[in-house]
Image: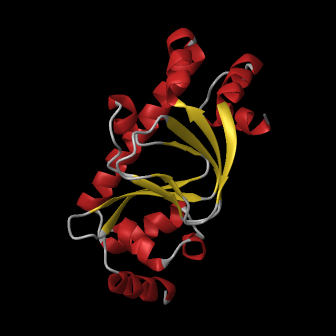
Amino acid sequence: MNFIKKITKLYSLSNSDEFAYKLNDILKPKVFKKNDIIIKLGETPSKFYILKEGVVRSYVVGPNGKEHIKILHKSICVFAPLTALVKKQASTLIFDCLTDCEVLEGNYQDFLTLTNSDLEFSSFYIKILEGSYINSENKVYDLSVLNSTERYIKLKKEIPDIENLIPQYHIASYLNITPTQLSRIRREYYSR
């Protein structure tokens, strides 16, 4: 329940115990190991997740078989293949654990039912959607405007210990650069 209270504070929601209890009722704790797949390509999802601890990536596989990381999810955040959930269709994204992870799993339809009848849940959902949109917009901006070194520095500010958490080739994929480019950037960054 303490973690639920942390979520209400993070999302600037009322500190009402009633909201916390209702949210807690629809969430179940789960533990995933490093490399576990949470959502498979082509799976029609029905769950959403709140990441308590760890790093999860969502990625797509291009026609050439190359993986492209869309988002690195770090605690505390809500994640799910939103388009697939909303449209009730197969996910085009894969979600897997880059580290051991602790999550809270919730049924999306149960959550939607609460958003239709409870103003606090509706507000929570809006804040989750706003955050998701802002993150997507920021990623597009970063890829469009920032050079690869600037993207690396920004990532290091967001997740200072990223290099101790996940392999370099995942960092390179997230930054949309090659591992060789990442090595050069890191060499320059650490020689300052």
Q: Position of residue 10 (x, y in %)?
A: 63, 37
On screen, 119 above or below 103? above
Taking the image as shown, residue 31 lies to the left or right of residue 189, namely: right
Taking the image as shown, residue 143 lies to the left or right of residue 111, namely: left
Q: Nearer the viewer, residue 26 or 158?
A: 26
Taking the image as shown, residue 128 lies to the left or right of residue 176, namely: right
On screen, 80 above or below 64? above
Q: Hey, which residue is sitting farthest front in the picture?
A: 43
Q: Hey, which residue is sitting farthest top in the picture?
A: 117
Residue at 63% across, 25% down: 13
Q: Position of residue 191 (x, y in %)?
A: 49, 90
Q: Position of residue 60 (x, y in %)?
A: 32, 58
Residue at 45% across, 83% down: 186
Taking the image as shown, residue 60 lies to the left or right of residue 7, namely: left
Q: Quadrant of residue 129?
A: top left
Residue at 40% across, 34% down: 85
